[in-house]
Amino acid sequence: MYQIPEANRRLLEAMKRLRAEQKSAVPGNQTRRDAAPSRPKGKSGTPATRHSDIPEKRREATPSRPPQEPSVRTKQQEFPGIDWDDTMSGDIQLAQLLYNERVRTFGKMRQMLDSVADGQQIAEDFGRQFARLDDSNRQAQAELEHYNAEKTFLYIHPIAKKFKK
């Protein structure tokens, strides 16, 4: 099996710690306040103030941030210059294929990174597979951006090369 270099190993450990912290931040997974470790002392020798020390009324009066919407954009928002509804056009069909390929490769790359972060064994050709997916993703993105702006394809992605007239 492939040996992970030390720098990557530290990165993976940091990712695991971050995931553990995110899981513990979920309501219901929080620890009791009285079980918290001792707090650092402030300048005057008194314990530094924490959010949990603020009275309830005062905390409620503090404006909170509105919940953020997920930053998921549709293909119409991402590429407004492409008429996605014209499914009879060969160029739009190619654009849809490229967009779907971009989404597929991104999902596969994320899945591969998640498996590494979870500590699963990785194959010897992990780097090669990941680089191939990344190249395909970048080429599809470049094709779509160019078509969005210029209404022509670059024909650098293998799918676009097959469609070239």
Image (cartoon, rainbow, N blue to C red):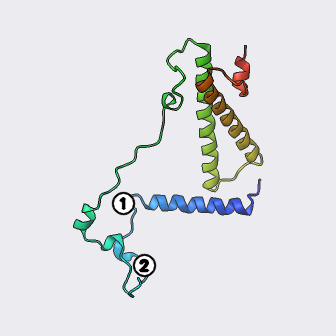
Q: Is 102 situated left or right of 155 in this image?
A: left
| Amino acid type indicated by mark 2 | Pro
- Which circle marks residue 37 in the picture? 2
| Amino acid type indicated by mark 1 | Gly
Estimate the x, y position of residue 38 in percent, counting from the top left.
41, 81
In the rendered image, the residue lying farthest to the bottom is 45
Q: Is 28 situated left or right of 132 in this image?
A: left
Name which quarter of the figure residue 59 lies in.
bottom left
In the rendered image, the residue lying farthest to the left is 57
Estimate the x, y position of residue 56 in percent, counting from the top left.
24, 67
Nearer the observer, 137 or 119: 137
Q: Residue at x 61, y 55 (%)?
A: 117
Mark 2, residues whose alpha carbon is within 10 Å: few (<14), some, or many (≥20)?
few
Q: Tell me the quarter of the image containing the C terminus.
A: top right
Q: Residue at x 69, y 23 (%)?
A: 160
Report the Cα–Cα distance between label 1 and label 2. Answer: 19 Å
Mark 1, residues whose alpha carbon is within 10 Å: few (<14), some, or many (≥20)?
few
Under tag 1, what secondary structure? loop
Nearer the observer, 149 or 5: 149
Marks 1 and 2, the one that precedes in the sequence: 1
- Circle 1 sits on which residue? 28
In the rendered image, the residue lying farthest to the front is 150
Q: Residue at x 41, y 84 (%)?
A: 43
- The mark closer to the camera, 1 or 2, is 2
